[in-house]
Amino acid sequence: MILLRCSIAVIVAGLLLAYGSSFEVREAQNAIFTQFGNPVRTVRKPGLHGKIPWPIEQVHPIDMETQKREAEGFAKGKIPAARAETDKLIKEATAYEASLVAKAKAELSVFTETYEQYRRNPALVSKRIAMETFEQIMQDVGNPVFARPGTRGILPTQEAKRD
């Protein structure tokens, strides 16, 4: 009787060990084997494969058809958004190009007119350019403070004059 119980216990333990030491990878399925939570190998070939019993090694089956469908769905969702972004960037670049071309044409027109005037009367145009430059500088300066030649010391700033 004891021998029968021991035999049954050994057979059950052997079956559990055999069951815990093997894993079947099905068609269209991959499996990732982990030891203590760290991936150690990937099996892509279908069939029966050996493994170290739990808790040392665990098997994580992956259904490749599901993964493929999810990846395709993700890609289909991203492609329209990427195309919309591309179209937006192209429109912005085209508008920027048009504004640069218009600005360049306007500057060319001003330059051409100034050059034609310069060809007719170089001295007058040179004086006019000098005056326009001086006027622009004076606008940037604001109200200048002039000092007599030979004056020494610090001139008051604009803020000090306002007070």
Image (cartoon, rainbow, N blue to C red):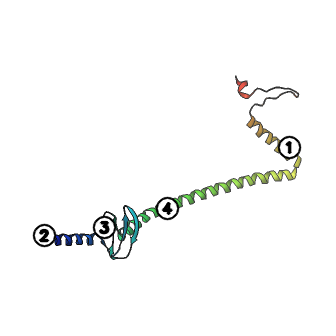
CA distance separating discs 2 and 4: 73 Å
Q: Which mark is residue 127?
A: 1
CA distance separating discs 4 and 3: 47 Å
* Label 4 packing within 10 angstroms: few (<14), some (14-19), many (20+): few
Quadrant in which the C terminus appears: top right
| Residue labelled with disc 3 | 53
Side of 104 where 113 appears, left or right: right
Residue at image coords 79%, 42%:
133
Q: Mark 3 belongs to which amino acid?
A: Pro
| Residue labelled with disc 2 | 2
Q: Mark 1 belongs to which amino acid?
A: Lys
Frontmost of labels 2 and 4 is 2
Q: Which percent across, then down, holds residue 28?
A: 35, 74
Residue 102, compared with residue 28, is above or below; it is: above
CA distance separating discs 1 and 3: 97 Å
CA distance separating discs 4 and 1: 56 Å
Frontmost of labels 2 and 1 is 2
- Find out whether the residues at labels 2 and 4 contact each other: C-beta distance under 8 Å: no
Q: Mark 4 belongs to which amino acid?
A: Ala
Between 107 and 74, the one nearer to me in the picture? 74
Q: Total label count? A: 4
**Numbered disc 2: secondary structure:** helix
| Residue labelled with disc 4 | 82
- Find out whether the residues at labels 4 and 1 contact each other: C-beta distance under 8 Å: no
